[in-house]
C-alpha cells in the first residue's frame, strides 16, 4: 500500500492529478522505439552529460 500511496501523492504533487497513477501502464506501453531513440539522441548527446569518477589514483 505504501507504493500506491507514494504514487498517488507524487502524481498529485507533480501533475495535479493523482488518478494519473492508474494510466501509467498504458502510457508506458505507448512509448515507441523511435521515441526512445529520439530522446536518447537528445539527452545522451555529447556535451549533454557529465561523467564522475570517484576514488583516488593509486
Image (tube, rainbow, N blue to C red):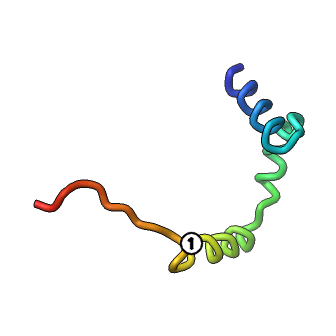
Which residue is outermost to the left? 58
x%, y% of residue 7?
Answer: 74, 33
| Quadrant of the rendered image containing residue 36 | bottom right
Please tell me which residue lies in front, 49 or 27.
Answer: 49
| Quadrant of the rendered image containing residue 22 | top right
Q: Residue at x 19, y 57 (%)?
A: 56
Within 10 Å of disc 1 (Cα), the crowding (few <14, some 14-19, many 20+) is: few
Q: Is residue 3 above or below residue 29?
A: above
Q: Residue at x 83, y 35 (%)?
A: 12
Q: How many labels sit on residues?
A: 1
The reply, left or right, for residue 11 in relation to residue 44 is right
The quarter in which the C terminus is drawn is bottom left
x%, y% of residue 57?
Answer: 15, 61
Which residue is outermost to the bottom? 46
Secondary structure of residue under mark 1: loop
x%, y% of residue 10?
Answer: 75, 36
The reply, left or right, for residue 12 in relation to residue 33 is right
Q: Residue at x 61, y 70 (%)?
A: 43
Determine which residue is flagged by label 1: 44
| Quadrant of the rendered image containing residue 54 | bottom left
Q: Residue at x 84, y 49 (%)?
A: 26
The quarter in which the N terminus is drawn is top right
Please tell me which residue lies in front, 26 or 17.
Answer: 17
Q: Is residue 8 above or below residue 44?
A: above
Amino acid at each position: 500500500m505504501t507504493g500506491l500511496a507514494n504514487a498517488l501523492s507524487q502524481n498529485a504533487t507533480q501533475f495535479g492529478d493523482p488518478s494519473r497513477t492508474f494510466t501509467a501502464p498504458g502510457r508506458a506501453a505507448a512509448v515507441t522505439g523511435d521515441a526512445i531513440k529520439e530522446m536518447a539522441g537528445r539527452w545522451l548527446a555529447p556535451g549533454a552529460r557529465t561523467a564522475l569518477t570517484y576514488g583516488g589514483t593509486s
